[in-house]
Amino acid sequence: MPTEPVGPLTTSPIITRFEGNPILTAAKCPYPATLTFNAGVCKLGDLYYMVFRNDVADPENPGRLHETNLGLATSWDGINWEVQPEPCFSLADDEIVRAYDPRLTVIGQRVYMCFAVDTRHGICGGVAVTDDFSEFEILSFSAPDNRNMVLFPELFGGMYVRLERPFPVYGRGRDSERFDIWISDSPDLRYWGNHQLLLGTEHVPFCNRKIGPAAPPVRTHAGWLTTFHAVDVDENVTWGGMTQFRQEGWKKRYTAGLMLLDLEDPYQVVGMCRTPLIVPEADYELNGFRNAVIFPGGMILEDDGEVKIYYGAADAVTCLATARVEDLIALCQQG
């Protein structure tokens, strides 16, 4: 089915990219690492924690990635990160191929991690919990195919709530990549139900393919500030940067969007910015493993009203952008 192009896009003027981007690269890891991106970030007390995806190239065939694990880094300012000596999480057995794309949510004093799981029979979403980032208890796996899951940091009427992005093989008729954001709830993080559509691709003007949850939502006085990623096909996107991983025909552009969900009923969208929040424009966003990719995975609201947004860039490195919370809320309320 023909797809109408989205056309030129620009980053919102309220966004400030950190001048020292990227804040995490493979060179900072004390163990084999090739692509360090799509990180989840949380804050406990004064200390920031980052769990990042690490894709590792085959030393005998540098153009092939042969392993994925999750690394752990800590920071006292949310800018300068120290990577811990060993990866903190990995999964692989006869059925599971790898775990990746972590998202961190603090509920009480425990850290819950959503992550994607490649299996030999499809892609699942997993939920695990940890108290120390060294041991994780896996609470549940979804059925295939589902991923990009994120948890809210509060319960609603005694129920946990998550955003998710299923991607059925048939899509919507012949439009096979029209994947949308859904929402569901659970009494115990193990059994999930009450699945409902939250946001469709047709509601996002800067998307002509798919959307999905990004960083876990953040509570504000106006509602749950919620990022998402949006994908459009752009004929101007070409491969570059890490040429050893070249994928011919790559034409997708990933941007970051923003919406506001009701504080008491997160099943309700109460506002959405109709233009993208962050668009790939910097060299480290345009050139990497996959070019022209912005993929938010963590968002921290500081006491002074600054919002730190952590995002994967070009599927290769981790970066930071900031904005004022009132400016972000205003974007959503303006529509």
Image: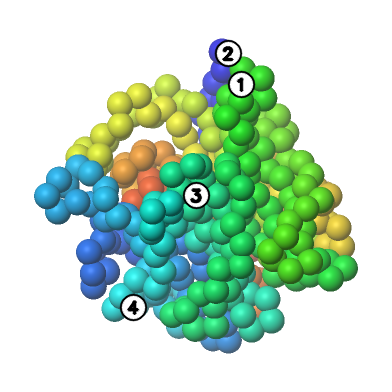
Distance from label 4 to label 2 (Cα)?
47 Å
Q: Is mark 3 in CB contact (under 8 Å) with mark 2? A: no
Give me the disc on residue 1.
Answer: 2
**Of the residues under marks 1 and 2, which one precedes in the sequence?**
2
**Of the residues under marks 3 and 4, which one precedes in the sequence?**
4
The reply to whether residue 299 is in sight is no
Which amino acid is tagged 4? Answer: Gln
Q: Which residue is mark 1?
A: 175
Tell me if residue 271 comes above or below residue 105 in the rendering. above
Which image quadrant is residue 171 in? Answer: top right
Single out the mark in the foreground, 3 or 4. 4
Residue 106, position as x, y percentages in the image: 63, 75
Distance from label 1 to label 2 (Cα)?
6 Å
- How many dots with numbers? 4
Distance from label 3 to label 4 (Cα)?
23 Å
Residue 222, position as x, y percentages in the image: 81, 61
Q: Which residue is mark 4?
A: 84
Residue at image location 71% in from the left, 35% down from the top: 200
Q: Which residue is mark 3?
A: 295
Quadrant for the N terminus, please.
top right
Left or right, 79 with reference to 181:
left
Q: Mark 3: which secondary structure?
A: strand
Which amino acid is tagged 1? Answer: Asp
Residue 225, position as x, y percentages in the image: 71, 58
Q: Is mark 1 in CB contact (under 8 Å) with mark 2? A: yes
Classify 10 Å Cα crowding around label 2: few (below 14), some (14-19), many (20 and above).
few
